[in-house]
Amino acid sequence: MEGSIIMSNEEDTGSNTQPATDLPTDLQSEGRQYMRKGWFLYLRDIEPERPRLFRYCRKLSGSVWDAEDLVQETLLRGFANLALEDNRDMQWGAYLARTASNLWIDQTRRKRQVPLEDAPEPTSPPEAETAAAIRDGGRKLMRLLSPQERCAIIMKDVFEYSLAETAHLLETTEGAIKAALHRGREKLADPTPSARPAPSAALVQQFVDAFNAADVDALRATMLTTVTAEVFALGTGRGLDNIDKPDRWIGACLNGHSPDPTRHQRAECAHLEGTPLVILWRRFGEGPEKMEEIWRFHEEEGKIAHIWDYCACPETLQEIGEALGYPVLARSYGYYHGELMEEE
């Protein structure tokens, strides 16, 4: 089952740092298992809020990939901060929205090299002839707002929080929210969207051909020995000799999510906004074939250096599927973490 590879208990053998205390091995293992179980119980509790969190992060970031990154960072930060919160009456939606807002504000401040106040005022409103163009234009117009202005506008105008609710979530005053809304609405402009470096289509196709041939040696040849396979929210495998074990990323992807002998699968190279992606199609028996996973690569030295696996990111899968015109089989965290917890 694929779940067996997703949360590995790898040790970083490249570090010379000694542990603060010399705990017995059995206690260290018990501690890791306890944290794993706590993480998946947390994912189970917040799962109903994930669609709304994704929509919020999508509006903030303007990119499906950046949105998923922000969702994952929010979940991790939220989990880490739980011990500091009085969570007896936790409202997950508000907690995660506040965490995402703070993260996005911090990230934006670090990335910006030019003060946002210096952005030129738009000379005329953008033209849009269709509803889709209006929505796309709205996302693009958000890029030159300051973090506080953007959060305020999305919470107030998109998600229709009240001024009081928005102020509470952003931990500020209603007067500050009113000022942010006023400034933000005046500064909306049509910016140039950010770009992520894309791997070469030839490399992605080479991977797809090797995958469809179930040729592990050929798959290895497409990757650096230091490759990292990151399965969002479920775990990370590091190093080629680690991820190509039968129960790790490569072996699990080749073997699929089910021992069902009627399962059929194939990989395909698809292009979205100029970026080549790997689409994994699956079909059981005589049922319809559906897109079940997306893999995105980062290339270095002509080989795959990092793999992002979106198998447990239902909103991202749905959006990409709609953009490509593909039917989607989206799976939740629960599909995976039940098996992972049972392994303990």
Image (cartoon, rainbow, N blue to C red):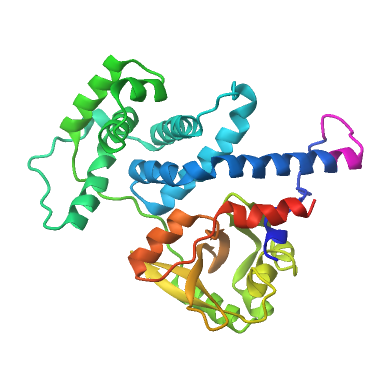
Point out residue 219 in the picture as x, y percentages from the top left corner: 63, 75
Q: From where the camera sits, is residue 267 visible?
A: yes
Residue 27 is inside the magenta segment: yes
Point out residue 110 in the picture as x, y percentages from the top left corner: 42, 34
Magenta residues, start to end: 19-28
Residue at position x 54%, y 59% in the image? 331
Residue at position x 27%, y 34% in the image? 145
Side of 167 where 264 appears, left or right: right
The secondary structure that dominates the magenta segment is loop
Residue 102 is inside the magenta segment: no
In the displayed structure, 34 sits above or below 86; it is below
Residue at position x 64%, y 79% in the image? 218
Q: Which of the image's four quarters has the N terminus?
A: bottom right
Point out residue 50 in the picture as x, y percentages from the top left corner: 48, 45
* Of residues 231 and 48, the one drawn nearer to the viewer in this rendering: 48
| Badge count | 0
Quadrant of res 248? bottom right
* Of residues 115 and 41, the one drawn nearer to the viewer in this rendering: 41
Quadrant of res 255? bottom right
In the displayed structure, 298 sits above or below 51; it is below
Point out residue 91 in the picture as x, y percentages from the top left corner: 50, 29
In the displayed structure, 298 sits above or below 221; it is above
Side of 185 where 302 appears, left or right: right
Side of 203 where 151 appears, left or right: left
